[in-house]
Image (tube, helix red, strand yellow):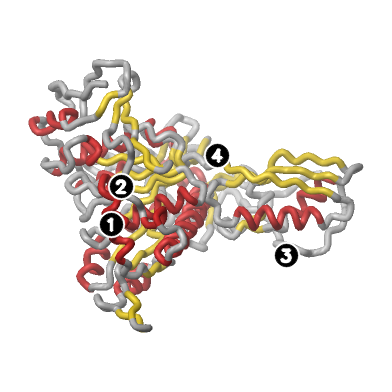
Amino acid sequence: MQPLHAPSSSSPYLNLSFRSSKPQHLTWGSFSHLKSSPLFAIHLTLHSQRDQSSLWRYHKSAIFCSGATRATSVEVGSSSVSTGTPEDDVLKALSQIIDPDFGTDIVTCGFVKDLQIDKALGEVSFRLELTTPACPIKDMFEEKANEVVTNLPWVKNVKVTMSAQPARPLFAEQLPAGLQTISNIVAVSSCKGGVGKSTVAVNLAYTLADMGARVGIFDADVYGPSLPTMVSPENRLLEMNPEKRTIIPTEYLGVKLVSFGFAGQGRAIMRGPMVSGVINQLLTTTEWGELDYLIIDMPPGTGDIQLTLCQIVPLTAAVIVTTPQKLSFIDVAKGVRMFSKLKVPCVAVVENMCHFDADGKRYYPFGRGSGSQVVQQFGIPHLFDMPIRPTLSASGDSGMPEVVADPQGEASKIFQDLGVCVVQQCAKIRQQVSTAVTYDRSIKAIKVKVPDSDEEFFLHPATVRRNDRSAQSVDEWTGEQKLQYTDVPEDIEPEEIRPMGNYAVSITWPDGFSQIAPYDQLQTIERLVDIVSPTVHA
């Protein structure tokens, strides 16, 4: 096994030469050429959506309707009467079980698989396939499924098997190869150093792994990587796959790990744009394999590195870490605003080092209120108070996370609650994003329900197409409208609508054009009203 050396190249990223067909160690030599590489700028322009009226007024030449019906929830334990085929009986019974995250029954969610029935013997077997192996209520699903099916009068024996088929990224084909098989990417951020962000990131990752998930950790702090200190993998050097030219992560207790600290030289001394290039390549060329959750330990600040990460990675959600001091709140608020502009939902706040108990009393040495202030000011739904515990700090220095060293301890229980929160919120976000913008062919209208909004409305496809603001439709220099009203037929229909992160959808039209439609823009377009059911002729 030979160390890698970086040949001279015009590429600002890592160019690695391979001298053996075996995995090779990734060393500082792989990065050193960046010192002389031309700097490249990372630009991110955040456009605020201006409220503006539609470019064209929609002339009501047709009336449409939703024709939608809403399912009625049934309480578990209600009487079960056989009214159809045995399969109908079983599915009707199982439809009484509601997924609390999706607000929909498990049959509609598509969880019920491999249903087999022998009515003569009174035997029923099926599999409940969940979207994550870390589902915190999988035992409840199994228990309730047994209960409701057993209540059917002809059923004598029920066999329920639990499994999980994690959902792939909603737009996997648009991602770098290394990220295409990661279901959820969660950023742990504070925008301020020294608040315990890395401690939260590592313990959250191992909590999710203990819940049954496949997990990876990416240490994005090149200047001061913490991961090599907080975990103790047997192999402390990253290796390369010479055939695929990819990075093989190291591993500790079943969790995959990537950090610049495992590249052989500890901390980096380089300029920001070069660091962005290193982070990009470390993250996107790693062979992560199939992961349910990738936890990113974000570096402090809101600069190029943070913005680059948010650009190249489809972050599912963010967890914010703070401490009780006012100074911490000021910096954390900047980070929350950054995530808000980038349409990354912040799902939880962890207030670290908030109190300790002694002599039968609770003491707050750093004051109170920073965490609750973040929750109240920014509407983040969940707050977790992390007490001061010497063992929590010591475990970070020993190379064994606290949730592994003391799984029944107070800190571990808080991390378990945080893990449940992250799993539930990620599932909820994915469901909201996947159904935010859809096309209803029966009424020939685009239905929009923006995540975190109760408002639902309909848009005419032609109106959406005419409101495209890309360079193909509007001259970037003069603002002149290039796409004319008559260029878009009134009966145009989208061929495909796909989510683009948490902020927009990509709409493919019959002419092959792919339109990026941000939620903010869709909310300003003229809407269809007075929707009426189409006439059905016998």
Callout 1, which amino acid?
A: Met
Identify the mark nearer the N-term, 4 or 1: 1
The reply to whether discs 3 and 1 touch (Cβ–Cβ < 8 Å) is: no
| Element type where label 1 sits in the image | helix
Q: Position of residue 80 (x, y in %)?
A: 83, 59
Q: Amino acid at mark 4?
A: Asp
Residue identifier under label 1: 338
Residue 469 visible: no
Mark pair 1, 2: CA separation: 10 Å
* Mark 4 crowdedness (10 Å alpha carbons): few <14, some 14-19, many ≥20: few
Asked if disc 2 and disc 3 are in contact, CB closer than 8 Å, the reply is no
Q: Residue at x 62, y 51 (%)?
A: 64
Mark 3 and mark 1 lie on one chain; the one further toward the N terminus is: 3
Q: Which residue is mark 4?
A: 491
In the image, taking residue 289 as reference, residue 94 lies left or right, namely right
Residue 375 placement: quadrant:
bottom left
List x then y, in percent, for residue 1. 27, 21
Residue with the mark numbered 3: 75
CB under 8 Å between callouts 4 and 1? no
Q: Earlier in the sequence, mark 2 or mark 3?
A: 3
Task: Look at mark 2 in the image and give the residue it sits on.
Answer: 310
Q: Earlier in the sequence, mark 2 or mark 4?
A: 2
Compared across the picture, whether 447 is left or right of 343 comes to: right
The three-letter code of the residue at mark 2 reads Cys
- Residue in the image at 34% along x and 51% along y: 400
Quadrant position of residue 273:
top left
